[in-house]
Image (cartoon, rainbow, N blue to C red):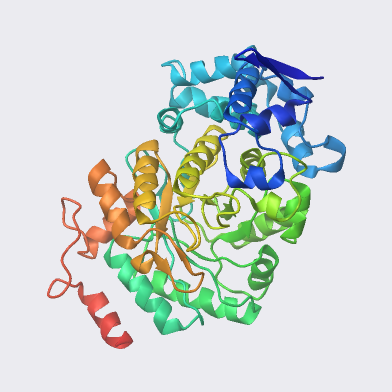
């Protein structure tokens, strides 16, 4: 079945829905690299106008990646909730955009709709939206998750405290954790990207994080961002593991490049549940994604990178995660060339995840060879704060010394919370006040003479 639309006297024809979707995407380097992008602005507009006329129900009958050969497609189709979809089943993509921007589509309505939406539907409508549309719609629904605290409530924005170290040195990691806590960071998770994937080393890091959380009675959770199979082995060895982590993608072949499939993720999820370490809830999976991962693995099947990314959220949704993090600029300029493309991608990812009922965060970041700088990150940080992001990253000096990329600092979280009136997770906020890290008005205490006594002792041990 072909698609066509005329623009300026020229009729543009597209072979299938996959091509319409790809050529309707705002320009980005990854789609050019894959050879699926529109050849001109006129062709892009024609594809967008064509896409606006496609009925939403078409995505249930014309899948972009074959059902028979891709388990992610099977997951999407087999788990689709027709009853939840019914209120919008008569709409086209363009009509759906207009409905989302209207007052009828409030937070409760969108939360009820989420099981009825497929990633392809939300990716399609995002391609027709301006930046302000992506923000306006995404801030309506709240996706609330719980493990040892409550993440995603209205007026709240959490942070992952990321104390990475190039040699996994315990003192260096502890110094970064102390620094981050004193800036009010760490309510989403204290999460380390390990320098090595040794199971014994992972277990030692888990014990260290657990000791800190238990000693200071911090209402948060820890995570070592290792392969899901290593987390399973750590649990089998009795390590105090809170969250099970895994990088995921939107196609079976891309997930295979990560050494996983849906069965592996299910095994990790069940292992995490078995240790019962959550106190307020059992959302215990932490997933990271990023536009371009399927293309970098040559596993995109001709589907544009933003739609592949949205499909990863269907994988995440199955396992009721605590956190899903799009590491938006990390893969590099081959996929998102500059600040403009990174900003757009971050807002798209957050929008699509929220509509699918996924607790979205964003690592607002770029690599040193991208055409981007910290001003671009300030803009995306502010826009995502307005859009209702669940969490962001907090890293010493915004420069990760182990992964060698640029992201957001501990102070950046203070900035956006102050400017937009956002606060930490309620349980964590109470702890910050108890430890005298925050004044009653929510402003950070000055360091020095007012450094809380337990942390003064910890600092003396480190130095």
Q: Residue at x 73, y 55 (%)?
A: 297
Q: Residue furthest right?
A: 68
Quarter holding residue 244: bottom right
> In the image shown, does 393 or 126 lie closer to the viewer?
126
Where residue 232 sits: x, y (%)?
Answer: 68, 66
The answer, for residue 118, to whether it is visible in the render is: no
Split into 4 quadrants, where in the image is the C terminus?
A: bottom left
Whether residue 45 appears in this view of the structure is yes
Is residue 393 toward the left or the right of residue 413 in the image?
right
| On screen, residue 41 above or below 448 | above
Q: Residue furthest front?
A: 9
Number of callouts: 0
x and y, in percent, of residue 461 in the image: 30, 87
Residue closer to the observer: 164 or 187: 164
Q: Which residue is drawn at 63% across and 21% down?
A: 46
**Quadrant position of the N terminus in the picture:** top right
Q: Give the image location of residue 187, x and y in percent.
A: 38, 57
Residue 450 screen position, x and y as percent: 14, 71
Residue at image position (44%, 53%) is 364
Judged left or right of residue 409, residue 405 is right
Q: Is residue 99 above or below residue 361?
A: above
């Amino acid at each position: 079945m072909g698609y066509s639309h005329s623009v300026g006297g020229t009729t543009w024809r597209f072979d299938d829905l996959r091509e319409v979707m790809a050529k309707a995407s705002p320009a980005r380097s990854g789609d050019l690299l894959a050879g699926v992008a529109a050849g001109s602005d006129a062709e892009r507009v024609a594809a967008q106008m064509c896409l606006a006329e496609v009925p939403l129900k078409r995505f249930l009958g014309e899948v972009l990646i074959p059902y028979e050969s891709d388990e992610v497609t099977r997951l999407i189709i087999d788990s689709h909730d027709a009853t939840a979809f019914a209120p919008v089943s008569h709409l086209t993509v363009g009509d759906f955009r207009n409905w989302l921007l209207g007052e009828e589509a409030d937070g409760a309505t969108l939360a009820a709709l989420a099981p009825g939406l497929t990633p392809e539907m939300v990716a399609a409508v995002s391609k027709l939206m301006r930046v302000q549309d992506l923000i306006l719609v995404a801030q309506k629904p709240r996706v609330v998750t719980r493990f040892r605290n409550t993440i995603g409530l209205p007026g709240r924005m959490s942070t992952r405290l990321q104390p990475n170290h190039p040699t996994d040195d315990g003192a260096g990691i502890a110094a970064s954790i102390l620094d981050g806590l004193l800036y009010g960071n760490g309510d989403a998770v204290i999460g380390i990207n390990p320098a090595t994937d040794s199971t014994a080393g992972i277990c030692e890091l888990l014990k260290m994080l657990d000791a800190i959380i238990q000693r200071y009675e911090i209402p948060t959770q820890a995570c070592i961002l290792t392969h899901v199979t290593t987390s399973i082995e750590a649990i089998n060895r009795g390590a105090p593991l809170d969250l099970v982590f895994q990088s995921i993608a939107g196609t079976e072949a891309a997930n295979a490049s990560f050494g996983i499939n849906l069965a592996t993720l299910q095994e990790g999820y069940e292992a995490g549940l078995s240790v019962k370490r959550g106190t307020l809830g059992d959302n215990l999976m932490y997933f990271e994604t990023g536009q371009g991962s399927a293309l970098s693995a040559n596993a995109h099947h001709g589907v544009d990178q933003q739609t592949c990314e949205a499909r990863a959220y269907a994988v995440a949704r199955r396992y009721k995660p605590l956190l899903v993090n799009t590491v938006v600029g990390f893969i590099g300029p081959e996929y998102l060339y500059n600040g403009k493309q990174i900003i757009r991608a971050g807002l798209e990812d957050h929008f699509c995840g929220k509509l699918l009922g996924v607790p979205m965060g964003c690592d607002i970041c770029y690599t040193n060879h991208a055409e981007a700088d910290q001003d671009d990150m300030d803009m995306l940080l502010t826009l995502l704060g307005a859009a209702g992001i669940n969490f962001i990253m907090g890293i010493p000096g915004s420069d990760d010394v182990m992964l060698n990329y640029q992201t957001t600092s501990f102070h950046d979280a203070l900035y956006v919370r102050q400017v937009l009136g956002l606060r930490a997770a309620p349980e964590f906020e109470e702890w910050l006040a108890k430890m005298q890290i925050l004044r009653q008005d929510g402003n950070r205490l000055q360091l020095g003479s007012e450094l809380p006594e337990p942390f003064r002792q910890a600092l003396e041990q480190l130095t």
